[in-house]
Image (cartoon, grey):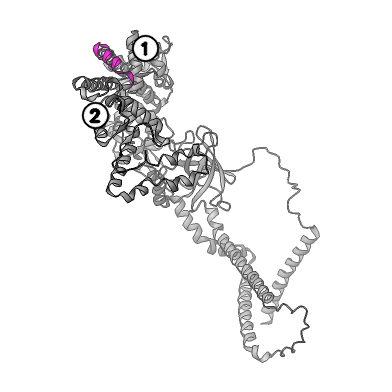
Amino acid sequence: MSNQNHIWSFSSVGGVKRVNLESGKDLEALEYLDQKLWTALSCPVYGLEIDHKTLELIDEDKDGQIKVAEILAAIKWISSVINNTDDLLKQASFFPLSAINTQTDEGKILLSSAQTILRNLGKPDANGLSVEDTSDTVKIFANTAFNGDGIISEDSSDNLELKTLLHEIITLVGSTNDRNGKVGINSEQLLAFSDACQAYAAWQQKTNDDRHILPFGNETPEAYLSYLAIKPKIDDYYLRCRLAAFDADSTAILNALVSRIESITNKDLSKCLDEISTYPLAKIEAAKKLPLSNGINPAWEAQMNEFRHSVCMVLFDGKTELDEKDWQIIINKFNAYEQWMAEKEGSSVESLGILRIQSILSNDSIQQLLAIIEKDKALENEANNIILVDKLVRYYRDLFTLIKNFVTFYDLYSPDFPAVFQAGTLYIDQRSCDLCIKVSDMPKHNTMVALSGMFLIYCDCVSKSTNEKMTIVAALTNGDIDNLIVGRNALFYDRAGNDYDATVIKIVDNPISIRQAFWSPYRKISEFIRKQTNKFASDQDNKVQASASSSIEAMPSQAIATPVPDAAPPAPFDVGKFVGIFAAIGLALGAIGTALASVVTGFMQLIWWKMPIAVSGILLVISGPSMIMAFFKLRKRNLAPILDANGWAINARVIINIQFGNTLTHLANLPKGAKLNMNDPFGKKSRPMWQIVLLLSALVGGILYLLISYELIKIHF
């Protein structure tokens, strides 16, 4: 029977009919299952409790999302290279070599590559391998000079010259790590080095073609540096002299030395060189030449001496002064050199020196390294097949885990395995919450989580041991909510058992249980009364304090010492003025009393067995609406909006009904067989027995009195 005619079986789970994946045939036929029957259509690569490297391999288009077509492609590939797809349901971490289908060419290649891996790992006789074996490429390729990645290291050749050149390339151009974990280079880095050497050599060749580039021969770089060091001050000097020639009265101002020197006379001049360096290079006079030795600003003597020896004495030997024409000659001498320096190429290899660069270019060492890289690339297919074994072992272990959490959400509704999106367990307020999900997009959660209908707690979690931080949302599906407020601290354990300090940052309020909904109106009334009582007491306290403060502030300073005459006696109370008020109060109290009497009378007229029914009816009138609303909400709690906010594309309802919700949040219970000592030394002391007997007697007497009075009234009328 072809997969297209496959007979499926379904189960009703969480209010939705979900397909049963019970065999490898079911997996192979998934491409023919209507996608409308899949629970999810897309899920994120990251943030799930499954090896993200496996998910990266399944994510063929590398968009960070795994979609239906990519899962089907993964199933199709692994089904073609293993003997029995039923093995995938085992989710085994150890992959036996006997599982490979050697009837196909790809299967034969995978078997050979797997055996190569085991030999490289020093386990040639092993009959299988694990993800830990296949993912450690450093160990797999540790003893291989060539591994198909197009990267060579110093181990790729025994030639000392090539090793030296390789080290130089790594130092000057950069490096790439080889699969064996060692530092190496690829062809791009080698060619970049070669191009830099050629460019630098061609740039240096220009000095041989044009003698004006180096006016001072090999000493030109040093002469140029000395020229640059003093040039701004010489330009400044000649400009000041021209201004002095333009206006003789400006000479004193241009020198501006007297007042400035006076300001530092009383200081240690050796510590004032920075300020002195701002003075002119030499004394300013109209059309004055620049002295080369005498009369130079002390702060610039060293630079001037260097310039005189390296430049002036070469060009104007014997001169003690420079005029502006001489200075212009010097400037012109360096123009060609400056232009040449601006055109420098290959500076990344300049530190090698032109002789070493010419030596590299004159032999074929670069071509030899390029040949070695090509030799390594020739093994690319073989090496990639070794890497492909890692894909095979990962799919063998993880693919079914993903499928059952994608197609059916089997793990969510199973007591044996947590779902891949369940991040761990949150402990708070004497309960543990198993339905905890990492939050990847808080703004989207703020928009969508109200649609879930669940009571949600958002927590910021920090691990003090690793400094890792995360935000989680925990669904509270059992218990009560009395002590849950923003800011409370809790403890979160991830799936690996690592603990995190958790702090509640947000609460989404929804019903948790029918019992909680029953007491909800009374809690709200109690909370309202408490708030109003506190408000009233606070207002009265503020009034008393304000009145006392104003009285004290208004009292004269001599009020204590000065006797106060007796005040006039208060006016007598006029009952007539308050007759209306008393009458209104009396009518109100009478109405209230009549209403209470009617209720009590009606209640007492009931047959004794109807009284509990009446009380229950009153309670239902108060709590009934809240319980009904909670009942319908609890039946529709849906996890889908939360997962959608995390990047999933959920295709079906993910209902968390009352029964299922009770399994996701566990309340604190004493261990079976535990002994409990009820004698609490700090507990509230019970009333003496005589007080209890007295209160019960008074209560029974009151009830009997009401019953007798009621019977007498009936007889009388």
**Residue 276, percent from left and from top:** 43, 40
Q: Is residue 378 visible?
A: no
C-alpha separation, residue under disc 1 versus residue under disc 2: 51 Å
Depicted 287 relative to depicted 225: above or below: below
* Secondary structure at numbered mark 2: helix
Q: Which mark is residue 333?
A: 2
| 296 inside magenta stretch | no
**Residue 706, percent from left and from top:** 70, 73
Q: Residue furthest right?
A: 690
Q: Residues within 10 Å of mark 2 (few under 14, many from 20)?
A: some
Q: Work out whether mark 1 precedes mark 2 in sequence or the reverse, and give the earlier one.
A: 1
Residue nearer the viewer, 700 or 580: 580
Q: Which mark is residue 621?
A: none
> For the stretch drawn in magenta, what is the main secondary structure?
helix
Q: Is residue 97 visible?
A: yes
Q: Amino acid at mark 1?
A: Asp
Write the start and end of the magenta stretch as one range.
Answer: 351-367
**Residue 659, percent from left and from top:** 49, 45
* Secondary structure at numbered mark 1: helix
Q: Which mark is residue 155?
A: 1
